Image (cartoon, grey):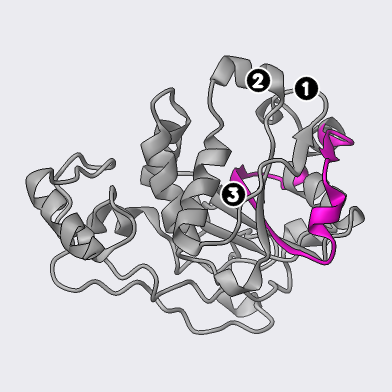
Amino acid sequence: MQQFFRWIKDIVFPPICLGCRRRVVDAAESDVELLCGQCCLEILDLATPRCGKCGFPAPHENNFEDRREISPFKFSGVSTRRMPINEQRSNYDTIYADCLECRQYEFSFEKTTCLGGYQGHLKELLLQAKGASGQAAGFALGQLLGAQLDASQFSRVVTVPMHWRRRLIRHHSTVETLARGVVQQTKIPLDLTITKAIRPTKKQGTLSPAQRRKNMRRAFQIRKPSLIQDQHLLLVDDVMTTGATLDELARSLRKSGAASVEVAVVCRAGWNVN
């Protein structure tokens, strides 16, 4: 019955794709309502070999220790139709043998899931999500990110928190909106009260890798350690560049009793590989 009413709503008020601004055809077939199939094709990169731990792209496929077969998204009909996002995922979840990032840093999280690189159509949509009225784009990207995850592996979703001073300026948290989209797709419980930013930090984009890690040192507090004891956590953020922010927060979560921490981000920087 719910599907029927959604079908009626789509006929009377057809959804408009946030990417191309065209009508989304057969939106009721997908849980991502506001992105058309063609835009999803342009957003998702499931073919680029990547490190399963940190998400960094690999320059050569044969450098993987255990490379698995790729399952690209399948479309039924023309490219503007909705795609069965819950059925297909990237299978590059193994550790890249010569990953420069993992060789340089000992990350405290176990795995990284991302939609693609910080470039092109995906970058444009994420910048839209960061805008004052970008909640719809952020939620849709979160839904698409959630479709890449195996929800049974996680006990709880947590986010990279925003310091209260920055929230006064931004008025909304893009990461929290992304997380709500992930949760709508996966049904994993979300808790926004566990992590807290306890001091303002400099913008990471202006700093070197070493400065970024120093900038994030002791920047977070775990407010309710009892809620994450022996829990398998999914940590959501928008972009991973060096991984300094996510690593610091994952380390704090692990020290507070979490059994494991995996990361889910919309974009992974450094995606320009040949």
- The nearer-to-camera label among 3 and 1 is 1
Mark 3 or mark 2: name the one nearer the start of the chain: 2
Judging by the rendered image, the residue that carries numbered circle 3 is 270
The percent position of residue 119, horizontal first and vertical second, equals 45, 44
The percent position of residue 134, horizontal first and vertical second, equals 40, 31
Q: Name the residue type under label 1.
A: Pro
Look at the numbered discs 2 and 1 and tell me whether their residues touch, using CB distance below 8 Å: yes
Q: Residue at x 49, y 66 (%)?
A: 148
The percent position of residue 87, horizontal first and vertical second, equals 38, 76
Residue 113 magenta-highlighted: no
Residue 238 magenta-highlighted: yes
Judging by the rendered image, the residue that carries numbered circle 1 is 200
Judging by the rendered image, the residue that carries numbered circle 2 is 166
The percent position of residue 268, horizontal first and vertical second, equals 57, 50
Label 2: state its secondary structure.
helix
* Residue 198 higher or lower than 18, as above or below: above
Label 3: state its secondary structure.
loop
In this picture, residue 226 sits left or right of residue 205:
right
* Residue 135 higher or lower than 79, as above or below: above
Q: Name the residue type under label 3.
A: Gly
Task: Tell me, yes or no, if residue 116 can be seen here.
Answer: no
Q: How far apart in space, not on screen, are marks 2 and 1 (Cα)? A: 8 Å
Q: Which of 184 and 266 is in front in this view?
A: 184
Report crowding for label 3: few under 14, some 14 to 19, many 20 or more residues within 10 A (C-alpha): some
Q: Which residue is drawn at 61% across and 16% down?
A: 168
Report crowding for label 1: few under 14, some 14 to 19, many 20 or more residues within 10 A (C-alpha): some
